[in-house]
Image: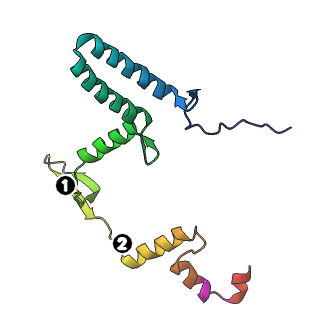
Amino acid sequence: MQNRFIVPQFIDAEDRIWGPITVRQFAIVIIGALFIFISYRLSDFALFLTQTIVIVLLIVIFGFVKINGAIFPMFLLSLIQTLKRPRLRIWKKEYIKIEEFKNKDENLVVQVIAPKKMVTGKKLSELSLIIDTGGVYQGELLANTMNNLPNKQINK
């Protein structure tokens, strides 16, 4: 008998409470209604109307607007993170530390540092071809060795 496991489907779909309203949207509407009630109790009618319009706009934006399939609060967080990152990225060339020697007589530490090996454009294009073909193409070195072998060895 095979072991069968139930794989959950649609894990990114939110639970619905009533019609198309999700739990998150319902909570946002309830909190917004609470703010509107507080505004009604604490301010005069003209200020209350102004605050109600602003609160309703915020409820609609935060509760129901999606941008590129993401809810507005997540979009807003991504936007803030993007704006905080530096626009200019500078590549810092690093060296690889090979060995570290200590002189017994003196407290002098000598480090042997070698620069990173540079990859040629031809090698990069060959690596990208290997990746693009999913490993079917093995590279020029393997192809050249296969071409130089006698036919008897290739068929084995």
**Residue at (53, 76) in percent of width and height:** 139
What secondary structure is found at the residue carrying circle 2? Answer: loop
Chief SS of the magenta region = helix
Quadrant that contains the N terminus:
top right
Please say whether residue 92 is one of the residues in the magenta stretch.
Answer: no
Decide: is 51 above or below 1. Answer: above
Mark 1 Cα within 10 Å, few/some/many (few <14, many 20+)?
Answer: few
39 left or right of 141?
Answer: left
Residue situated in front as seen by the camera: 142 or 83: 83
Hey, which residue is sitting farthest right in the picture?
1
- The residue nearer to you, when weighing 43 against 70, is 43
Q: Pointer 1: what residue?
A: 110
Q: The residue under label 1 is which amino acid type? A: Val
Q: Quadrant where the C terminus lies?
A: bottom right
Location of residue 116 with respect to 29 vertically, above or below: below
Q: Classify residue 154 as left or right of residue 64.
A: right
Per the image, label 1 sits on a secondary structure element best described as: strand
Looking at the picture, tell me which residue is in the foreground, 97 or 84: 84
Q: Nearer the viewer, mark 1 or mark 2?
A: 2
In the rendered view, would you say 140 is above or below 58?
below
Q: Check disc 2 and report the residue beneath it.
A: 119
Magenta stretch containing residue 149, yes or no? yes
- Bounds of the magenta segment: 146-150
Q: Amino acid at mark 2?
A: Val
Q: Residues within 10 Å of mark 2 (few under 14, many from 20)?
A: few
- 151 in relation to 134, above or below: below
**Could you tell me residue 45's position as x and y percent?**
24, 17
Whole-percent x, y for residue 149 in the image: 63, 86
**Coordinates of residue 46 in the picture (x, y in percent):** 22, 21
| Image position of 65 (left or right of 153) | left
